[in-house]
Image (spheres, rainbow, N blue to C red):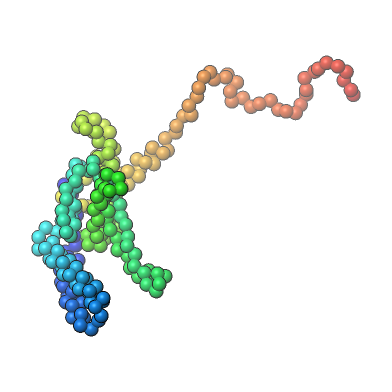
């Protein structure tokens, strides 16, 4: 079983900073118009709720992801769900960019970890804030690779255990099962997968042939110049 936790330093900032921002926003209600006051009030409620959830994670279980070969447990800031890998359709990342000066200058970017379930357009999608995880940018990339390896292994795994050992890719079956997600181990697993892909691409594939093979196949054609065969009629010198 592997697990990935939320960063306790970032949970502390959320638990302390969000209520402070909420109180500061409420202090401005008497100095702005009714429309802005409504926006500030809604934002303050959301900030206070985020602070409470951050404190709950900080004082309790800070695990964000927990997974093995069969199941994946996703604990967002608001809920917790346990799904089977066979029900996961795609694992990836997305980014929400913030721009200033009429959209010409990028001032920030928030990265998310997305886990999409099967079911078409109406399928459920789980989203974790990547910046809240106890991983750097390279570690998040390796985590996505490791999650994708488990998802692909579940697709290749049939119903019987005997056939599963044969059909599961070696690079996915050999994924280390540590208590905590190890970026170094995930990197080694990723390199093994890339090496396996390169070996499959480099294997020569014989071109298929149909019917009889002529014994003169491969012999270069006769040149178009040179002595011409004799014919009938007069020869003009």
Identity of the residue furthest to the front in this view: 34
Image-based side of 44 in relation to 93, left or right: left
Q: Is residue 66 above or below residue 160?
A: below
Residue at the (32%, 43%) spot, across then down: 193
Residue 227 in percent (x, y) is at 78, 24
Q: Is residue 61 above or below residue 231?
A: below
Image-based side of 65 in relation to 187, left or right: left
Residue at the (30%, 63%) spot, across then down: 110
Within the image, what quadrant is residue 195 found in? top left
Q: Is residue 118 visible?
A: yes
Which of 169/46 is in front? 46
Residue 223 in percent (x, y) is at 71, 27
Residue 201 in percent (x, y) is at 41, 39
Residue at the (26%, 44%) spot, across then down: 118
Question: The C terminus lies in which quarter of the figure?
Answer: top right
Identity of the residue furthest to the left in this view: 59
Q: Is residue 14 visible?
A: no
Residue at the (17%, 66%) spot, across then down: 50
Identity of the residue furthest to the right in this view: 237
In this figure, what is the number of numbered marks?
Answer: 0
Q: Is residue 65 above or below residue 17?
A: above
Which of 228/78 is in front? 78
Which of 78/13 is in front? 78
Which of 123/135 is in front? 123
Within the image, what quadrant is residue 98 found in? bottom left
Identity of the residue furthest to the top in this view: 232
Residue 1 in percent (x, y) is at 16, 47
């Amino acid at each position: 079983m592997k697990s990935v936790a939320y960063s306790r330093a970032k949970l502390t900032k959320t638990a302390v900073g969000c209520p402070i921002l909420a109180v500061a926003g409420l202090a401005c209600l008497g100095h702005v118009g009714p429309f802005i006051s409504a926006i500030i009030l809604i934002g303050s409620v959301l900030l206070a709720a985020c602070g409470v959830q951050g404190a709950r994670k900080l004082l309790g279980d800070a695990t964000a992801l927990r997974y093995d070969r069969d199941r994946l447990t996703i604990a967002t800031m608001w809920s917790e769900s346990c799904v089977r890998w066979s029900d996961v359709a795609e694992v990836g990342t997305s980014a929400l960019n913030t721009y200033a000066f009429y959209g010409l200058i990028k001032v920030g970017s928030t990265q998310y970890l997305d886990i999409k379930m099967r079911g078409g357009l109406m399928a459920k999608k789980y989203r974790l804030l990547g910046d809240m995880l106890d991983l750097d940018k390279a570690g998040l990339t390796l985590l996505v690779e490791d999650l994708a390896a488990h998802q692909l292994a579940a697709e290749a795994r049939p119903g019987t255990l005997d056939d599963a050992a044969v059909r599961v890719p070696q690079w996915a079956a050999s994924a280390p099962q540590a208590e905590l997600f190890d970026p170094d181990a995930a990197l080694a697993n990723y390199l093994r997968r890339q090496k396996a892909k390169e070996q499959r691409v480099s294997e020569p594939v014989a071109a298929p042939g149909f019917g009889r093979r002529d014994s003169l196949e491969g012999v270069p054609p006769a040149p178009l110049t040179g002595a011409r065969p004799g014919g009938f009629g007069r020869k003009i010198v």
